Image (cartoon, rainbow, N blue to C red):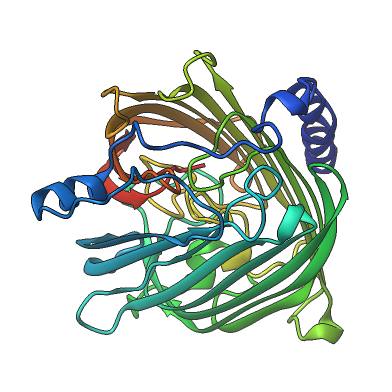
Amino acid sequence: MRTNSIFQAALFLLCFIPATLLAQDASNMIPKQGTVKDTSRQTDLIDIAKNLFNINPKEPRVQREKKIYFTFLPIPGSVPGGAGRALITSTTAGTYLGPQSTTNLSSASFAPYWNLKSRFGLPLRSSIWLKDNTWNIQGDIRFLVYPQYTWGLGSKNAPNDKTLVDDNYIRFYQSALKQITPYFFAGGGYNIDYRSSIKSDDPAVDLKQFTGYAYGTGGSSVSSGINLNLLYDTRNNSINPLPGSYVNVVYRINPKFMGSNDNWNSLYVDVRKYLPLNPANKNQQNMLAFWSYFWTVFNSNAPYLDLPSIGWDPYNRSGEGMDQNRYRGKSLFYVESEYRRDITDNGLLGFVLFANVNTVSGSGTLFKSWHPAAGSGLRIKFNKGSNTNIGIDYGFSKGYNAVVLNIGEAF
């Protein structure tokens, strides 16, 4: 019964949702050939700083070819998973490696954090678009030493029925996708997840017994293998997506002969849609955004910390308003919607309203129990050249609430 449910959900996502979202003519979703975005009528924090220090440029700032746009934000905050207060420095860079009319914005983000003790993280993520979008090179490199709470499989445990898990984590993901037709890409790459010193922070808690799961709950775990990747993307800016569609299908194979502890495979299907509510006014944002993903593992021996878990999507942005890892299982289905709108005519200030829900297998059947969250947030334009916002969001769910600062949108 569980297998049938998984394949029915995967078939639904792979066939029905992409077909519905992609029915719109893609030529209406991105700028026409030869157009360059004029940002002279917008205002960002860089403009405010220049006015404050009497730095007056001779010409209005216009987004130019091959210019690098930086966003830098050092903030004190709390790291998900029990690391407590930490110093977080988030840097995002964006640039065009070809004509803006035919090349997407390449981006890289580096967000190291340190809790002034023994917990730290060095995550570096990148998405590089070569000239005319001929290739998309994706990277995700992390070295993390930090604890994370876990509630076991499924959703039967109460919010306070959790234990802190210590582990050292190294991730190296690298993929290359070749353009097959406009907006459609195919390729693959190599993924490795290496975890060591996996144990409960409480010596009295046996992690294997607490989770009821035998694989990857003690000592170390290695998941090493290849991925096969299909991508359809009509957006031209992943930092703050413009109207368009996005579908990503990743099938990962982790064989023993490549270093994995056990043979296991996984499927990740990600679908997003961005609908402008006032397309005639291109200088103000007024948009509905939708995001859904389905993530499942095949075989019963995937390491525990590599199982699908809320907040552990590729960019760790799902489940806003929930504690990271709150729900974990062999399959996870997630849906989120956002309303995004500018408050000021110059685009300096904006707001979002969001709601999300997920269901996970483990303690029961997928789609049987649903877990909602909601919230709202303020947006401040940091760099209008790359359309990068600073987000201050408040989210809440059953037994949890938090204020989170981010650079860029959740999806």
Along the viewing direction, whichever of 202 and 289 lies nearer the viewer: 289
Above or below, comparing residue 341 to residue 226 in the picture: above
Of residue 62 and residue 284, the one placed in the foreground of this image is 62
Of residues 48 and 254, the one nearer the viewer is 48
The residue shown at (74%, 67%) is: 175
**Location of residue 42 in the rendering, given as x and y in whole percent from the top left corner:** 33, 34
Q: Is residue 325 above or below residue 253?
A: above
Q: Is residue 329 left or right of residue 351?
A: right
Residue 227 visible within the image:
no
Picture residue at 59% right of the left edge, 45% below the top: 363
At 22% from the left edge and 69% from the top edge, which residue is drawn? 86
Give the residue drawn at x 55%, y 60%. 66
Q: Tell whether 371 sits left or right of 183.
A: left
Q: Is residue 21 visible?
A: yes
Tell me where residue 338 appears, x and y as whole percent: 46, 27
Q: Residue 56: percent from the left, percent from the top?
A: 19, 50
